[in-house]
Amino acid sequence: MTRAELHFHLLPEVDDGPADLGDAVALARLAVADGTGLVTVTPHVRDLLALGILHEVPARVREVQEALDAAGVPLEVRTGAELAHDDVPAFDARMLDAIAQGPRDARWVLIEAPLFGGRAEEFLAATAWIRRHGFGTLIGHPERCAPLMERSDAIAAERRAGARLQINASSLTGAHGDAARAAGLGLIRSSQADVIASDAHRATRPPRLGEALAVLEAHGIRGGDALVRDVPHTLLEHGLGALPSVRAA
């Protein structure tokens, strides 16, 4: 089983990811070189809404897959998106299903913890709204969200409600500063984090799963490979409630 990425900006000409299809193929090659065999394509929902192309994502993902196949890049791509808490007022259950991942009976949505403003209460209200509409929540890069990291009670409550946490590999490698790095390591060490993903955008912000695993090993944290391989595959095939017993600690 290869590594799988659940947070990866591979769709070209949409957000701050690849500028064109050629850039997307080049970024995919980096993912394969990093040991990844499957990527869920997660463009920012705010950009999809601004461009009016939310409904086009599956077709655009198929176009990327066809380009990868033609270029001989052995990477499977699947449809997804990265929702922000302030996107939620524009959404309904049908739109959530269009960007959700996982099996038909256990769909879930990647929602990013806010990086540039926004109160924890607003974010938590958005995750609760998503769950009320029948979808699970995978919280993207909580370690980079100071208001959320200051609320250990909120993180515990989210996990009790069924939410899972995704840590950015770039946080673990120090790209986002010492605080994000320490927070990410702490969440993993305490078994509160479930997935590591690159949140890659371009060749200048590449996949870093291998580097992140090396950081965990250097800190004496075992079982990190499950967070980039076993758990992502399980979430895609069986949903958030069916995680394997092997966890980093």
Image: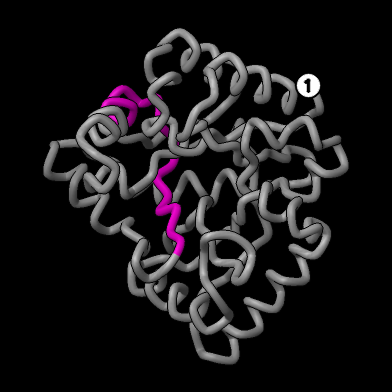
**Is 15 displayed left or right of 130 in the figure?**
left
* Image vertical order of residue 246 relative to residue 80, above or below: above
**Which segment is the magenta one?**
186-201
Characterize the local packing of mark 1: few (<14), some (14-19) or many (20 or more) Cα atoms within 10 angstroms: few
Relative image position of residue 98 (x, y in whole percent): 79, 50
Relative image position of residue 125 (x, y in whole percent): 67, 17
* Image vertical order of residue 32 relative to residue 108, above or below: below
Picture quadrant where residue 53 is located = bottom right
Name the residue type under label 1.
Answer: Arg
User: Residue farthest to the top?
Assistant: 153
Picture quadrant where residue 202 is located = bottom left
Colour mode? Answer: one colour
What residue do we see at 66% from left, 40% from top? 109
Q: Does residue 199 show up magenta in the picture? A: yes
Residue 74 in view in this figure: no
Relative image position of residue 51 (x, y in whole percent): 75, 59
Q: Which residue lies under the disc numbered 1?
A: 132
What residue do we see at 72% from left, 71% from top? 60
Q: Count the marks: how many?
A: 1
* Image vertical order of residue 16 relative to residue 180, above or below: below
Relative image position of residue 138 (x, y in whole percent): 57, 35
Which of these two is toward me, 232 or 31? 31
**Is 71 displayed left or right of 56 in the figure?**
left
Work out which quarter of the rendered image holds the C terminus and state it. Answer: top left
Q: Does residue 4 show up magenta in the picture? A: no
Work out which quarter of the rendered image holds the N terminus and state it. Answer: bottom left
What residue do we see at 29% from left, 42% from top? 176
Residue 84 in view in this figure: yes
What residue do we see at 80% from left, 44% from top? 97
**Local SS, label 1:** helix
